[in-house]
Amino acid sequence: MSEKEDLLVNGKTSDEIKRWTVRRKSVLVMDIIQGKMTVKEGSQAFDLPVSEIERWVAEGKRGLENALRVNPLEVKEQYERQIKELQQAYGEAMLELRGKKKQQTQTPNEDT
């Protein structure tokens, strides 16, 4: 068995893990944050996409940041804030797109 196959999460090898519970994800994320394993090694060892593990690490860091706040936000508040920010960004992008389309229709075609 190779070194990567020997990697354990909660005492289970990659072949034994059927479902990635929050606890298993957090153990893997902590191993990555602590430098015990890289994202690439985790991806290979547990047959997971790199992007998925990177997403878990990013979510873990956000959760850690929130937990260390003087007044931590509730999960609902976090999602509501994120939705509001995304809606605002979407609205701005739509305005920019409409402005560009309007500008294109007002500009005379140089080819004719």
Image (tube, rainbow, N blue to C red):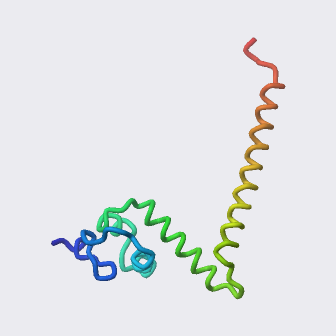
Residue projecting furthest to the left: 1
Residue projecting furthest to the bottom: 70
- For the N terminus, the quadrant is bottom left
**Vertical side of 13 occupied by 102: above or below:** above
Residue 65 x/y as whole percent? 61, 79
In the rendered structure, the answer to whether residue 90 lies left or right of residue 23 reads right
Q: Which residue is drawn at the image coordinates 78% and 37% (left, top)?
A: 98
Residue 68 x/y as whole percent? 63, 86
Q: Which residue is drawn at the image coordinates 43% and 82% (left, top)?
A: 34
Residue 42 x/y as whole percent? 35, 69
**Vertical side of 72 occupied by 102: above or below:** above
- For the C terminus, the quadrant is top right
Q: Quadrant of residue 82?
A: bottom right
Q: Quadrant of residue 89?
A: bottom right
Q: Which residue is drawn at the image coordinates 39% and 59% (left, top)?
A: 49
Q: Which residue is drawn at the image coordinates 44% and 80% (left, top)?
A: 30
